[in-house]
Image: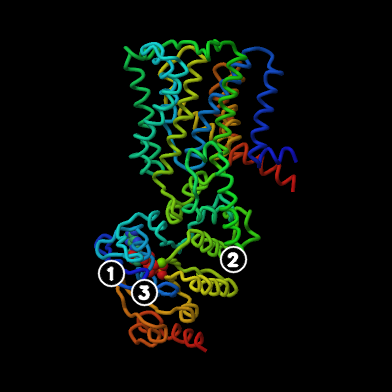
Amino acid sequence: MTILDVQGLGISFGGVVAVDDVSFTVAPGEVFSIIGPNGAGKTTLFNLVTGIYHADRGRVRLAGADVTGVAPHLLAGRGLVRTFQNLQIFFRMSALENVMVGNHLAERTSLLSDLFGFPSVARQNRATRRRALDLLERVGLARYADVAAGGLPYGVLKRLEIARALAANPKVLLLDEPAAGCNAVETEAIDALIGEITRAGIAVVLIEHDMKLVMRISDRVLVLAQGRRLAEGQPRTVRNDPSVIAAYLGEHGAREADRAYG
Amino acid sequence: MMLAAAFTSRRGTLLLLVAVMLLVPLVAPSSFYLRVAALVWIFALAALGLTIVMGYAGQVSLGHAGFLGIGAYAVAIGPRHLALDPLLSLALGALLCGLVAYLVGKPILKLKGYYLAIATLGFGLIVALVLASESAVTGGPDGMPVARLSLFGWRVTGALTWYWVTAGALLLGALLALNVEASPTGRALRALHDSEIAAAGAGVDVASKKLAAFVIGAVYAGIAGALLALMNGLITPETAGFMHSIELVAMVIIGGLGSVTGAVVGAAFLVVLPQALTSLQEYEQAVLGLLIMVFMIFLPSGIVPTLRRLVLERAS
Ligand SMILES: Nc1ncnc2c1ncn2[C@@H]1O[C@H](COP(=O)(O)OP(=O)(O)OP(=O)(O)O)[C@@H](O)[C@H]1O
Ligand SMILES: [Mg+2]
């Protein structure tokens, strides 16, 4: 079964091909990782899939429906939700409110009821608040609920973005380097969290440079280099692929991945 | 405690506003002061509309006085040329502001930052120009008289009456603005202020939310403009002018961007100070400009947010 189906996706920026004919599929409950050197086109691929960029070529299907060119907010409504490599946090809002925004799609109020403060708004606010608190609890950030997000450390904000994404009830969750800049303890927490997320049947597409993490939790790995697919397969296979080692993993990466397998 | 509540809770903000509104008539030495206070309430109402656009949604508007002008001329033109009731004209003017904001906002809210600023500036200039040049209907640059307002047969006249009418309008405006702030719509607006890409990623229809904020802000300004015209009994195209647009922006920023109390404080600052400085005669403008600079240097996040921080620090 396939929840996300990407076929022949490509985009160029002023003659430079950033993503070139990339295809992959992801199944529910699976961790599908995308790795590759800096500038390989990983984030650009996410931007294409989530409708932020318009693909020059290729198609994206979500739960069987063609969603190529569908606007980002509508894709979120269909269950395609992401986090960002360069944090996109609502800095002026509290941590709790950040997650509450994630629940936007489930909120059943209208502009007029919001203006006039009908009782339904207070009810909705309470429901959203409860849900956001639960999610903060789940990512281990409950104690920061009322702190302005602008004052929180980087590692905390990475998890805050995941909580906000989960609030949107994703079918497919795209995580762009969730462990970047995180210490060992925070990385461990993210590892465990991804496990929990996939057990709930959500498909996770993961971009990550931390090879230990990737090799441990991925079901399948796609390797990109210069916008193209270099290899795809199980972590074990990819790790031993000579072209992958040459292009990306190198001696250091291969050794680290070995240790991960123990 | 009381002070902390006034700064942090919705009810506290409203109670503080009501308290000030009740107090002013008791201490005002003459009806002149009541008129100035009524002007504060009117401009605070317009500034509140801009607070929703700029403070919540983060979309700059340098033409907001255009809506002030549309609302003002609606209550001037309606009764005079179309034999409409002033109150009905006010409602139609507010509706017209919303409609114009929708039509203008749809294309220009796609722009960002400086580009949006210039586009809204252009809108304000066009409104002022039309009001000044369509002399047959608007009386041209000299403006036109405005028929008195009567509510259900009761003629609204006198400084104290206008004081209460404008205070009531502002209170209602503040209530609705506070409602929005803490609602799903308000969260969506404040979210897209910080990151449009993340707001869209959370399912927020960024374009339509911006447009909603712009329309609401325009209706606020339209009603403020109508009250201004009805109270003064005379209206000129200057109401829609660039200076007024800038003043509204200054009110919102000096008071504290995104704060309801801030919009009122900012309006008070820019309405009362020029009156207080008139004794300085030719130095009035210079001193006013200097004061604005000093306030922005020492209270860069605005008067109310700075006070709020001080009070909360002391309370904790
Ligand atoms: N909007 C854009 N305009 C021009 N070039 C772009 C744009 N977006 C991406 N690129 C280019 O596409 C290429 C791929 O960038 P991308 O950010 O996708 O890499 P990445 O694999 O995510 O790298 P990293 O591991 O450093 O995050 C880069 O050469 C980048 O400069
Ligand atoms: Mg990247």
- Which is more N-terminal, label 2 or label 1? 1
Q: Distance from label 3 to label 1 (Cα)?
A: 16 Å
Would you say B196 lies left or right of A181 here? left
Report whether residue B254 is seen.
Answer: yes
SS class, disc 3: loop
Where residue A227 appears, as percent x and y from the top left, is 31, 71
Q: Distance from label 2 to label 3 (Cα)?
A: 28 Å
* Amino acid type assigned to the residue bearing label 2 in the image: Arg
Chain identifier of the residue bearing label 3 in the image = A
Chain identifier of the residue bearing label 1 in the image = A
* Ligand 1 under 8 Å from disc 1 Cβ: no
Q: Which mark is residue A7?
A: 1
Q: Taking A160 as reference, is A21 above or below it?
A: below
Please state, as top left, top right, bottom left or bottom right, where the N terminus of chain A lies in the image. bottom left
* Amino acid type assigned to the residue bearing label 3 in the image: Met
The residue at which mark 2 appears reads as A138
SS class, disc 1: strand
Which quarter of the figure has residue A245?
A: bottom left
Front position in the image: B67 or B298: B67
Q: Taking A233 as reference, is B71 above or below it?
A: above
Q: Distance from label 1 to label 2 (Cα)?
A: 34 Å
Which residue is found at the position 39% from the left and 65% from the top?
Answer: A43
Mark toward the viewer: 2 or 3: 3
Name the quadrant where ligand 1 sits: bottom left
The residue at which mark 3 appears reads as A1
Chain identifier of the residue bearing label 2 in the image = A
